Structure formats: structure tokens, C-alpha cells
Amino acid sequence: MIRILGLFLLSGLLFTTLNAEQKERDGGPYIGVGYGMASYNDDDYFDSVVDSNVASYNLYAGAFINKYLSVELDYIKSGQFNVIDSTTSKTTFNYTSITIGALAHYPTFEDSLDFYAKFGAGQSYVSMSSYDGAALVVGAGVSYRIDETFALRLAYDLYTFNYDSDSRGRFNMNMQYAYAAIEVQF
């Protein structure tokens, strides 16, 4: 996965030098769809996490306030994580989150390459209903504008959430998500 992300970044840098005439982004909405790998950390709540890396997807929509700041609404759905619980039975679940965040952008190469950092909050849902609650998300990424409408994004997001067990205390769980996305800017 790291090699694929590196290859996308390298090809984006090469295309940037070939496509020097880009219009600057003054604001406006965008939507995107991404696909990548999610990794789950349960803070030792389960006896073991059998499949800790699963394919996942996300959808997002946002609006640029200016070329340095945007707001974004994200939806992520993970594949099936397999874990073994305290009763030694195998359990599967998936993680879903809806968050809203602010993105600070640093555009370079005449606005065709855009580095960003993200911070947001929202609601997380684990298919085992007692694990629902608030989630925080932080992330970083880079996007390459192919033309005035389309962009490619490579990103990493970290979703953190807590689970309070009546008998075992508090667990600080998280899900890491690295993905590639295609984005349409209006």
C-alpha cells in the first residue's frame, strides 16, 4: 500500500511539471469517493484482532472557503474486522463514521498540488450497537488537480473513539485509514 501511495505521489509530481497552466481555486464545493485500507486498534479490549487490515471506502463533500481553508463532511465504512472476544468466539463487525471537519490547505505549483491537514469530530458506529459514540478525526493528505474539475487525493485519517465497559473500564480505540480518492470540484 505504501508503494502504491508513493507511486501516485511521484506521478502527481511529474504531471505537475507538465501541466503548468492551472487556475487558482478561489472557493466552491467539491465531492469525492475514496477506497483504501483500514486498520483497527482495540486497546486490548478483545483477546485478539484476527483481521486488522480491511478494505474500506469513503464518500465526502466539502466547500472551499478560499484556497487555504475548506470544510468537509465525511462518511466512512470499513470492511469486516474479525476479532476473538473473551468467550473465545469469533466476532465480525464493521466501523462506520460520519464526521465534519476543517481542512487547512497549502497549495503549491500554481495551485495544482495541494497539501492539507484535517481536524474534525462526529459520530462513530460499530456494528455491535453498544460501541456507538463520539469520534475525533485527524488527517493529512495531498491532492493533485488534473484539470479545473478533477483531482486525485492520497490521504491518511485517524479516527479515535472511546468505549466504556461497566466491568472493565475505558478503552481508547482507533481506526487508521489510508486511501486514494477521485474528487470533482465545481
Image: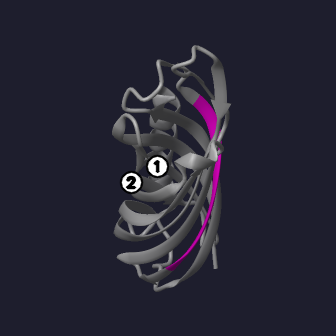
Q: Choose between 143 and 14: the one closer to the eye.
A: 143
Location of residue 182 (image quadrant):
bottom right
Q: Which colour scheme is used?
A: one colour
- Residue 3's label in the rendered image is none
Q: In this view, does 10 lie above or below 49?
A: below
Q: At label 2, which amino acid type do we have?
A: Gly
Location of residue 78 (image quadrant):
top right
Q: Choose between 107 and 13: the one closer to the eye.
A: 107
Secondary structure under badge 2? strand
The furthest residue to the front? 167
Location of residue 55 (image quadrant):
top right
Q: Mostly what secondary structure, the magenta segment?
A: strand
Q: Which of the marked residues, 1 or 2, is nearer the chain's N terminus?
A: 2
Q: Residues within 10 Å of mark 2 (few under 14, many from 20)?
A: some
Q: At label 1, which amino acid type do we have?
A: Ala
The residue labelled by disc 2 is 139
Q: Give the range drawn in magenta.
A: 54-63
